[in-house]
Amino acid sequence: QVQLAESGGGLVQAGGSLRLSCAASGSRFSINDMGWYRQAPGKQRELVATITTGGRTNYADSVKGRFAISRDNAKNTEYLQMNSLKPEDTAVYYCYADITTTNTYRYWGQGTQVTVSS
């Protein structure tokens, strides 16, 4: 059984920074692409950032230049460094990982609240 566990959300003032982590646990698996989505109240879920096994990244226009996604393959963990946070970044952030055991499925973290005050 593979699980993703998120950590690092919280309350921060505008202009501040937060770092989210998402760690995969289980046995006999390999991780392919990883990424982060977010969902604000009353809004559709938004893809924030993705990272491939080789480290190629992609970002939503709304976070380019402020957020950085990274991964530590040895620790089966991905990170989202969020700088220059804005109130509009307030949302629940969900990590995902495309994981292969016998087949490949997308696994999701439990979600972590990020609140940016003005």
Image (spheres, rainbow, N blue to C red):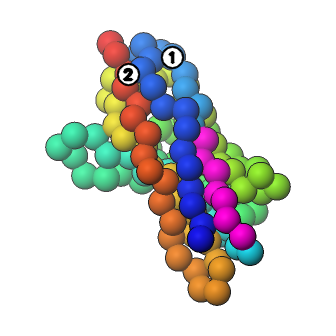
The image's mark for residue 16 is 1
| Mark 1 residue element | loop
Residue occupying the point 56% across, 56% down: 4
Quadrant of image for the N terminus: bottom right
Residue 39 forms part of the magenta stretch: no
Magenta stretch encompasses residue 22 = yes
The Cα–Cα distance between marks 2 and 1, rounded to whole angstroms, is 8 Å
> 118 left or right of 80?
left
- State the extent of the magenta-drawn residues as a range: 21-27
Residue 81 is situated, as x and y percent measured from the top left of the image, at: 60, 34
Q: Amino acid at mark 1?
A: Gly
Task: Tell me the residue at 25%/52% (across/down).
Answer: 44
Q: Residue 47, labelled with which disc?
A: none
**Position of residue 74 measured from the top left corner of the image (x, y, whole percent):** 82, 55
Q: Is residue 35 above or below residue 85?
A: below
Q: Secondary structure at mark 2?
A: strand
**Residue 114 visible in the shown view:** yes
Along the line of sight, the residue nearer the viewer: 64 or 6: 6
Q: How dense is the environment of label 2, judged by Cα within 10 Å: few (below 14), some, or many (20 and up)?
A: many
Residue pointed to by mark 2? 116
> Which residue is at 48% across, 31% downward?
9
